[in-house]
Image: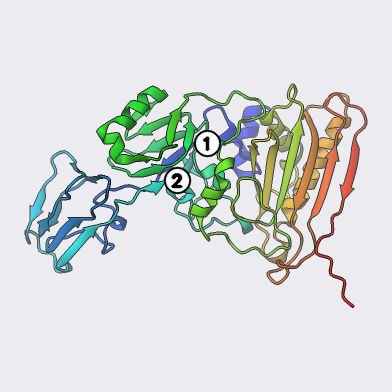
Amino acid sequence: MGTGKLRAKLPVLLLLLSLLAADGARKVWLKNTNWMNSANWKRGSLPCSKQVVSFEEKPEPYAVFVEHDVSVGELVLPMNGEIVFADDLKVNFGSFFHEPTCMAGENRFVGGEPEDWLNPHNWRVEDDLSVVPPMSSDGAAVPTSAADGSDGFPLLQAEVVPCTHDTVVFPENATYLVSLDHSKEVKQVDFTGTVYKKSNEFGKFLESENGKMQFKLGPSGGIVVQGQDCNDNSGCYCGNEEHMDKICDLYGDNCLSVTCSNPVTPSGSCCPMCGAVLLLSYDKMSFDIMAFQDRLVDDYMLNEHGYKGRVKGRVSKLKDGHVQLVLVDNVPGAQNGMAAGEVGKHIASLIEEDNMSPFPTFGVTSISIDKSGVGNKAQVAGGSGMNTVIYIAAGAGGGAVFFIAILVSLGIIIKK
């Protein structure tokens, strides 16, 4: 079966490697400082013709974009900042329109607080222009504006924030207020329709009056536009692993409760989950992450109808060079994660068999598997320990393959 046909079937199968593909993913910034965004107003609703409109004063100026005609009773402009009006826009003063639902009083613009670049809630992930939800236990999307109710493959929180080879998008007809205290690399930045592919070009914008008003960079903050695709056959590291403390702090208490015992927490995730995590070591000369995906789909996922559509996963390259495969399933209750664990074990056995063949193709030299256990909510705190299985292969050149199964029992309590 050809590679093109295999990849075309991925949306109903297991793996998605689009973030590791040459063109990366699109990460779209969600927050803005637009007038027509009701979340930016103290009353939670847009100003109307009987209200006095004012703007929250901030130490640093910010911009507000007005995209449509507005009616206000009175407009009190800020001491500093910028109001950007769309073309041919009208501002009507007084009760020009009959608005029986308009309540008189003040309505203050409070959307002038910078939003952190590292906050996963501030980004929407798009792959081939479809929304990709974040990874969560029980196969459900976590409560974040990045993915509620969307179809697609799951992401870890570190992968929601822009990675080194991603395209960052700030949609047109909007103004923004972004804070960043760290230096981050991205492939390119599409800012309101202008695409920046070089650091010096985007750097000039950041130093402009308009750029400073919309990007609040700390002493160590910076956005490096390197303009390069991922050219490593083993995949490319996202670049956010070292910021996990900040990412998870900003993500907040949004992790779903788990129903399994001893849930696993993958690298790049803020939340424990029911499922399995596989760490792969590989031969740099022969391992190809896309070929690895295709072979798994061809040899296993297309033929195992019992798991088809039940198990979702994410493959990613880690900072230490390992490749991580995270598997979750949608099996409810105490059995949640068991199907993912079975898939992980079978994938490992396929690799073992491949290494024993005269012409191994995966290029994987060893695998370790951590998986959650059977349980329920009452067992999570003190259940039996997770199973760790280590597969050690002799290498891509063949030879003996050794299998070591280590069952680690944790939390054993001896009572009189």
Residue 101 place in picture, x, y as percent: 18, 68
Q: Which quarter of the picture shows residue 357?
A: top right
Residue 223 place in picture, x, y as percent: 43, 33
Quadrant containing the N terminus is top right
Q: Which quarter of the picture shows residue 44?
A: bottom left
Residue 372 place in picture, x, y as percent: 74, 57
Q: Earlier in the sequence, mark 2 or mark 1?
A: 2
Relative horizontal placement of residue 401, taking residue 121 as reference (left or right) = right
Residue at the spot 47% in from the left edge and 24% down from the top edge = 227
Residue at the spot 50% in from the left edge and 58% down from the top edge = 143
Residue 188 place in picture, x, y as percent: 44, 29
Q: Residue furthest right?
A: 400
Q: Residue furthest front?
A: 219
Per the rendering, the mark at residue 123 is: 2
Q: Secondary structure at mark 2?
A: strand
Q: Secondary structure at mark 1?
A: loop
Does any portion of residue 91 appear in the rendered image? yes
Q: Quick check: marks 2 and 1 in contact, CB under 8 Å?
A: no
Residue carrying label 1? 163
Identity, as a three-letter code, of the amino acid under mark 2: Trp
Residue at the spot 59% in from the left edge and 52% down from the top edge = 270
Tally of marks: 2
